[in-house]
Image: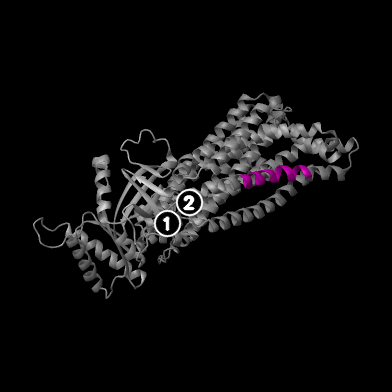
Amino acid sequence: MNRFFYFKLAITNIKKNAKTYVPYIITSILTICMFYIICSLSKNPDLTKATGTGTMSEVLFLGTIVCGIFSVIFLFYTNSFLMKRRKKEFGLYNILGMEKKHISKVVLCETLIISVISLVFGLLIGILFDKLMLLILLSMFSVKIPLGFYISSASLNSTFILFAGIFVLIFLNSIRQIHLAKPIELLQGSSVGEKEPKAKWFIALLGFICLGTGYYIAVATTNPIAALMLFFVAVILVIIGTYLVFTAGSIVLLKAMRKNKNYYYKTKNFISISGMIYRMKQNAVGLANICVLSTMVLVMLSSTFSLWFGMNDIVDNYYPREFQFTPSEYSDKDIKNLKAWINNTLDDFDQKPTDTIEYTTLNFACIGKGDTFIVDKANSTYSNMVNDISTLSFVTLDDYNKIYHSNVKLNDDEVLICSSREKYTSPQLKVFNYTFKVKNTFDNFPTDQYVAANVAKNHVVVVKNIDILKNINKLQQKVYGDMASDIKYFYFFNVDTTAENILKINDKFIDDMQAMANYPKDTNKYIYQGKIDCREESRNNLIALNGGLLFIGVFLGVLFMIATILIMYYKQISEGYDDKERFAIMQKVGISHKEIKKSIHSQVLTVFFLPLIVAGIHIAFAFPFITKILAILNLTNTKLFVISTCGSFLIFAIFYGIVYRITARSYYKIVS
């Protein structure tokens, strides 16, 4: 036998089955291309040219892992469609005298051809588009990029090893199926339908319970910490519920519709419902996959777009002023020296501090039970009550009046309260042996970034004087011991200059502080020990983080949409071949072509758009949950998230409709 016989036969088979193989090859090329790009970007040295881009590299590396895992699952899943369509052909080869080892050689040649084409074109396209993706990423930082291509040998190796391994595993799995199947099973492999499934009420009920529980957790959870802890629980419940409802609940529903004789015994409904019941087990898994992928795409896009476009709100929530100084220890003399050092440094840049804010505060954690805040080192009784975790930040009335340019008066037992995360509504506040009356509440206290970033409920409590604050400090020191907080001094200010100069000023502060650390212990020079935070530098870091998340969100969203398209396409093709003979028989027994086409249209519409509708329901219930999680990142602009969610769903629905038109046309051509 000619040694090239198997290759020629493999090429002929791929050409003959172009309708199924070409989309698979294109998808493999795109998946390889996208994996190489994201892997290369995570290792690209040009990505370290701007402040904060190290964070982006870490995010991209995590995206590489997700992309790699998804590629394995995705290519295996799509290959199963190919094998189903090819089993009849392999069975025919077997009956005509070709042994299974010869069929295995044909499959090996086909796999080699597909893998070589996919890897070569995938890597070439990846290298070409890698530079464009880098330009898009670094355009967020206004960094100039040198001309020329950067080819990452490490990324080439990683991509080749991963996808070569995937194709080897796919080949071995195909051989396993061929060798385990009998010739008659191979011959009928593409035409064997599912037995009519039973109406499994218990599984259907369990599916609805899982969905309902997941929805309830999403809607009922009000605390951001609890939302973060319960997020994956809710996600798993909804995913399980989705699969159970599609596989069992849909059958229960269809059989209930079949029992309605007035509805069922109409030509269009009869064909649609009986056809969907007959293969619903296989359909349901594919529909659930599409639904879960669609939901993931929508959540990723809406969340990452919200984080990107709400970045200024996040920065403003974290940083009330451009610079924040927080000494580790302080005294009146230290504060005077700190301000002198700041002023001297700013003089070098011809700047003065403006819009200054300064205050002294005590911040510690506790358990909030109504109007009572329990301070307990072990918190053993309340450790499982995540919703009750709170922090209290005490400031003096003098500092409050200076900040707000007011002249408010308080009695010893009165306080003012400003709350984040959740409004304080009780008329009093109890902590230790104090019972304070809440004289009034107020908004937008300029807390430092560490308090602003606190995911627990925080209450800024304004007390009458420093003596009360110090006494509360002694009480919490007694309870917490080595874990106790200290009274802190905060100094905030702006400078009226460009972003570039602000970063230079910040670098000078940091350099001076590092130089101070080398002063001898007996020096009389001022030594600053503490934290220095710059809003502009943090903005760049946040751009890197959110830019990386946005890029990953869009990138994985595109990858998941490609997966959705291919699953839809193969499902339509597979069902088209399964339905072709059945509809031909119906025409022979007297059902008109027009009635059959109406029935097909009804069935395809129902099956195709059901995942999108259910994904929309998932997103609606997940909305308050995701809002709480975004609040942890200080994105409290709910209106922005509503616009991002609705916009993402609308764009995805339009795209989904276009895919429907394309794949439905292929289905109609097969069954007509």
What percent of the width, then of the height, locates residue 593? 87, 44
**Secondary structure mainly formed by the magenta segment:** helix
Say whether residue 375 is left or right of residue 555. Answer: left
Q: Quarter holding the N terminus?
A: top right
Q: Label 2 vs label 1: CA separation?
A: 25 Å
Q: Quarter holding the C terminus?
A: top right
Q: Is residue 143 above or below residue 67?
A: below
Which residues, given as a range, are shown in magenta?
602-617
| 550 vs 132, nearest the viewer | 550
Residue 400 magenta: no
Circle 2 sits on which residue? 630
- When asked about the image quadrant of residue 229, the answer is top left
Specify the amino acid type for callout 2: Leu
- When asked about the image quadrant of residue 105, the answer is top right
**For the residue carrying disc 2, how many other residues have a C-alpha within 10 Å: few (<14), some (14-19), or many (20+)?**
many
| 478 vs 239, nearest the viewer | 478
Say whether residue 116 is left or right of residue 548. Answer: right
What percent of the width, then of the height, locates residue 496? 34, 73
**For the residue carrying disc 1, how many other residues have a C-alpha within 10 Å: few (<14), some (14-19), or many (20+)?**
some
